[in-house]
Amino acid sequence: MTSALLPTYARAPIAFERGEGAWLVARGGERYLDFGAGIAVNALGHAHPHLVEALTSQAQKLWHTSNLFEIPEGERLGRRLVDATFADVAFFANSGAEANEAAIKMARKYHAVAGHPERFRIITFEGAFHGRTLATIAAGGQQKYIEGFGPKVDGFDQVPFGNHEALRAAIGPETAGILIEPIQGECGVRPVPPQCLRGLRALCDEHGILLIMDEVQTGVGRTGRLFAHEWSGATPDIMSAAKGIGGGFPLGVCLATADAARGMTAGTHGTTFGGNPLAMAVGNAVLDVVLADGFLEHVSAMGILLKQRLAAVQDRHPDVIAEIRGEGLMLGLKLHVRNAEFAAAAREEHLLVIPAGDNVVRLLPPLIITEADVAEAAKRLDATAGRFAARLRGAAA
Ligand SMILES: *Cc1c(COP(=O)(O)O)cnc(C)c1O
């Protein structure tokens, strides 16, 4: 039967009915170990009791009021995020792309209210991904997302990843800021070295421009810190987060210093749905867990364990797995075999992983995984790699 949905996705032929922790249960009852977490979204796994309780109890009281009224749960979530980060203010949206749109507008407005409306250009990096709106595809700069959608939104200058000369040369009198993912996600889990983030901070200070970090995928505990930039000691002026922050409820946020946000006065930006009471109740519940004592240490410990187990799998299958990279529970396997085929083979082992650029598959498990889950994933990855090793041997014979 043909689908009534716009065919913009090549979907795997499988539908899930329910989830429990790190496991998804398909319609037929088969259980899958979920090391994709809905693309780093289900940070606390599926059907986490604290999130279910927060959502259902809020659902019986109030879902939506609009931002024309005060939203106490939003005040509380904003305050907690501000207290836990570099930021002074928060703007809630519904997605990563919208959080980035707010960040981009904020950076432009910052210079405009300082008498420099000509400073509107933002420098981004090759391989970046910032979303699928017209501005964020221009920011990401990937031709496959831009092509056919009319003139590319102006104001984004892309430089090669890791090329300091090109970066310096790109800063001009129209530059408003630099936008970067601390670890490029969609491009294949490419970490930015900590000294480079510190270098970017210094460069922005030197030129009076803003450092914007896109932590939509890396944030909310994913790397073992609340936000990935904390590993470097460099702080942004503006930061977006989404994915894990709602634990599966659509939620994004743009966080900023008071100075960076100075242009964003009443009426300059808005959203109908963003920050509604239902979203805020869930967001607070996610933070309850992520900020609890020992949670981030657990993420780090599981990340180290997973990396060790992956190294052992790679040792056994060096002709399948080329490289392991990433931080915490945001790991990538660069492969010698095709990543989409590897992900499909892993699915046959009832393990879910997510393809990314650079022929990588990403492992983005729920942050609540246990040692047993790590062992199980390693076993299934070993079996997956074994399928290819057998094929490669067959081809060689
Ligand atoms: C997923 C992602 C986005 C876009 O988020 P949406 O919620 O899909 O709009 C932006 N930036 C990064 C780094 C992402 O990983």
Image (cartoon, rainbow, N blue to C red):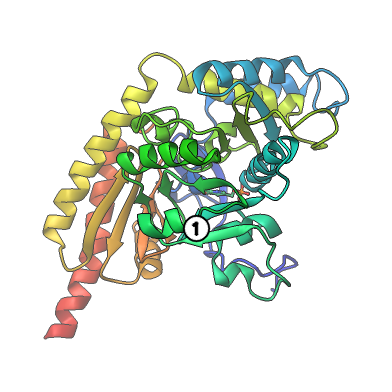
Residue labelled with disc 1:
170
Label 1 neighbour load within 10 Å: few <14, some 14-19, many 20+: some
Q: Residue furthest right?
A: 68
Residue at image x 55%, y 32%?
Answer: 237
Occupied quadrant, residue 153: bottom right
> Quick one: 337 or 324, which is closer to the camera?
324
Q: Position of residue 120 (x, y in %)?
A: 67, 50
Q: Position of residue 327 (x, y in %)?
A: 32, 41
Occupied quadrant, residue 353: bottom left
Which residue type does callout 1 highlight?
Ala
Q: Position of residue 352 (x, y in %)?
A: 41, 53
Regarding mark 1 in the picture, which secondary structure is present there?
A: helix
Say which quadrant the N terminus sits in: bottom right
> Quick one: 392 or 40, which is closer to the camera?
40
Give the number of marks.
1
Compared to residue 221, the image places residue 109 above or below, namely: below
Residue at image x 48%, y 31%?
Answer: 220
> Quick one: 109 or 217, which is closer to the camera?
109
